[in-house]
Image (cartoon, helix red, strand yellow):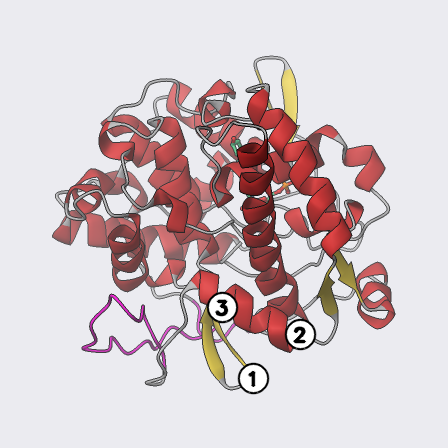
Amino acid sequence: MEVSRSRKLTPSWNIHIQQFDFSKVFFSRSNMSVLSPKKSGEFITKNAKNVFIEESGIKKLAHEIAEELKSKELSIDGFSQHELHPQKADEAAVDWIFFADTLNFCFWSADKDHKSWEVSWNGKTYTGYFAFCAAIKKALENGIPITSPKFYSQVTSEQLEKILRSDNPNAKVTLLEDRVACLHQTGKKLIEKYKGSFVECIKECSNSAQSLLKLIVQEFPCFCDEATFHGQRVAIYKRAQILIGDIWACFRGQGLGHFTDIDTITMFADYRIPQVMIHFGAMKYSDELMALLKSDTFLENGSENEVEIRGCSIEVVEQVADEVRKILQSQGHSDLTVNAILIDHFLWDYRRKHAEELESIPFHKTLSIYY
Ligand SMILES: Nc1nc2c(c(CN[C@H]3C=C[C@H](O)[C@@H]3O)cn2[C@@H]2O[C@H](COP(=O)(O)O)[C@@H](O)[C@H]2O)c(=O)[nH]1
């Protein structure tokens, strides 16, 4: 099933693979070379009109993160500590993560009252991303091989709707048809070219996160999260990078999760982290943009405001990482790992722990398969 081209939500994927040296550019559309996510963050921040980075907030965030790294409250173990994530770092975990990150987007509900999609498992009710993880757990426990490419490359809308059904009436998962199309696209490619497992993709990349990133966006277009901003092609690659980040965290940087250049991966520009950045005063919206978000206006994927929010969040994390390294260095802790993935985990987990406090800060709503 082709990804729906008619729907505005999914920009057309008529992508031209450039016969380029991929060490400089990634995947590009309409013959423009694309900046790396890190360079994109810098470029977007420099040219942003409605989103601003605040030095004082960067420092405030950096101090909190440095403390959590020293106390080990923030560490690579975070991913596996969650009961809904794979507990064993093996090939089945890689296929779980690849399946999950193929659909790791848009868990808010687009209907007017935004009734939340909920899934209960083991006596607990989850919403959002963890509701999705609970649905995977339940499918596997019911003998549905949902993380197997053989299964999901042929999954029907009815099957997926049933697997992802909400436990509260009338709420349902968004973009169902796009999710089916993503699964068909990625599942078929894994079977045709990678012996039916993402493990083969990892093995092809000789422990380089950047090589794996290029392979992902080149082979699986539904991960190719790019935009044109002020005439420049920019890459955000949120799901492609979180896929690598989750494998790194699940394997604790060893074996299939060992990447010599993992620190070149940026944060994962979703719709939650900007709320935390605003809360810490590290990022600021213009009054006009804030009013737009508070009025519950959806932002188009690839629009100026949406790209500014996502690009500036990448740059905020890069600046926070530099600041954290300086703090830890000055305190004799330069041995601690500091990278955008761990800072991202702090921010994302912070939002879940302080959901009430952040309630008043609107998150930008974009119906998109990219995040
Ligand atoms: N930047 C970033 N975005 C992340 C994650 C995760 C899950 N990983 C965490 C879980 C355990 C691990 O230790 C990781 O900390 C999901 N999302 C995104 O959030 C949105 C869903 O939000 P809500 O509707 O509130 O559930 C959606 O765009 C989804 O793609 C992350 O880590 N970073």
Per the image, is 12 magenta? yes
- Counting from the top left corner in percent of width and height, residue 1 is at 33, 61
Residue type at the position of mark 1: His
Q: Nearer the viewer, residue 259 or 162?
A: 259
Span of residues in magenta? 4-29
Ligand 1, by image quadrant, is top right
- The residue lying at 21 percent from left, 54 percent from top is 189
Closer to the N terminus: mark 1 or mark 2? 2
Q: Which mark is residue 230?
A: 1
Residue matched to label 2: 48
Distance from Cα at disc 1 to Cα at disc 2: 10 Å
Q: Is residue 320 above or below residue 219?
A: above
- Confirm or deny contact between disc 3 and disc 2 (CB under 8 A): no
- Residue 85 visible somewhere in the drawing: yes
Residue matched to label 3: 40
Q: Is residue 136 above or below residue 170?
A: above
- The residue lying at 59 percent from left, 53 percent from top is 319
Closer to the N terminus: mark 1 or mark 3? 3
Distance from Cα at disc 3 to Cα at disc 2: 12 Å
Q: Quadrant of residue 237?
A: bottom left
Q: Label 1: how many residues lie within 10 Å, few (<14), some (14-19) or many (20+)? A: few
Q: Nearer the viewer, residue 147 or 362?
A: 362
SS of the residue at dot 3?
helix
Main SS of residues in magenta: loop
